[in-house]
Amino acid sequence: MTTKVLIADDHALVRDGLRHILTNAVGFEVAGEASDGISTIALARSTEAQVLVLDLSMPGRSGVELIKQIKEEKPALRILVLTMHAEQQYAARAFKAGASGYLTKESASAELVAAVSKVAAGGVYVSLAMAERFAQSLNEPVDALPHQRLSDREFEVLRRICAGETVTEIGEALCVSSKTISTYKARILEKMQMPHEAALVRYAVRHKLFDDNDEA
């Protein structure tokens, strides 16, 4: 039986690489591709497939919110997150939203076929490196850290703030107004009980929330 796969990533070279890996493996068919959040939703609605390989950060509606919407509309579609974000916090939120697998792009060439196969068969896939991070996190107090109080969208805004993006740039990336982002920023400061943006950045560095090579 052929496993039909959808690919959603805003970088054409990444989509080309994923398609090449899958089409050269036995038993897979790439049934469609999308380059942003809106087109991903449209693709999931219009194309029958077993697995969606989904980039966590794309223009428009993206990330955990996108996973939630797709699972609400297409509950049978299995989602394998493929992302630059190797942080345990992102993986935990993705699984909670309905993802069935989590794979970093640096591991994709070696693990993609196994990951898609496992997810398509109804299993859950986590790379060895990510599994180790999850195991380590079990020793941390539950809900003890300020960033764990943030919603998924607030956590995404925090990531972009720490990456040095301006309020305007974050608004454009998430397709909302600068005023809305300013509201999110104020809410983040309040929830985390931080006095200013610099304190947020220091907190993120201290707790290693985001990789040094993190990209949007």
Image: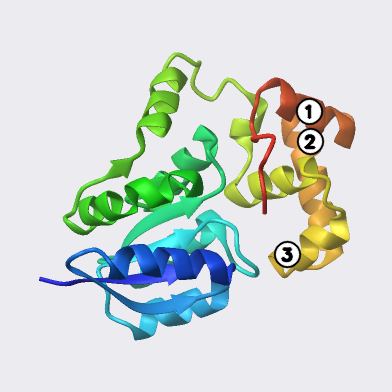
Q: Secondary structure at mark 2?
A: helix
Q: CA distance from mark 1 to mark 3?
A: 26 Å
Q: Quadrant of residue 19?
A: bottom left
Residue 101 tag number: none
- Looking at the image, which residue is at 17% across and 68% down? 27
- Looking at the image, which residue is at 35% across and 46% down? 110
Residue 56 is left or right of residue 47, and the answer is: right
The reply to whether dot 1 and dot 2 touch (C-beta < 8 Å) is: yes
Q: Amino acid at mark 3?
A: Ala
Q: Residues within 10 Å of mark 3 (few under 14, many from 20)?
A: some
Q: Position of residue 37 (x, y in %)?
A: 56, 71
Q: Is residue 163 above or below residue 211?
A: below
The reply to whether dot 3 and dot 2 touch (C-beta < 8 Å) is: no
- In front: mark 3 or mark 2? 3
- Looking at the image, which residue is at 50% across and 16% down? 141
Q: Earlier in the sequence, mark 3 or mark 2?
A: 3
Q: Which residue is mark 2?
A: 190
Residue 139 is left or right of residue 117, and the answer is: right
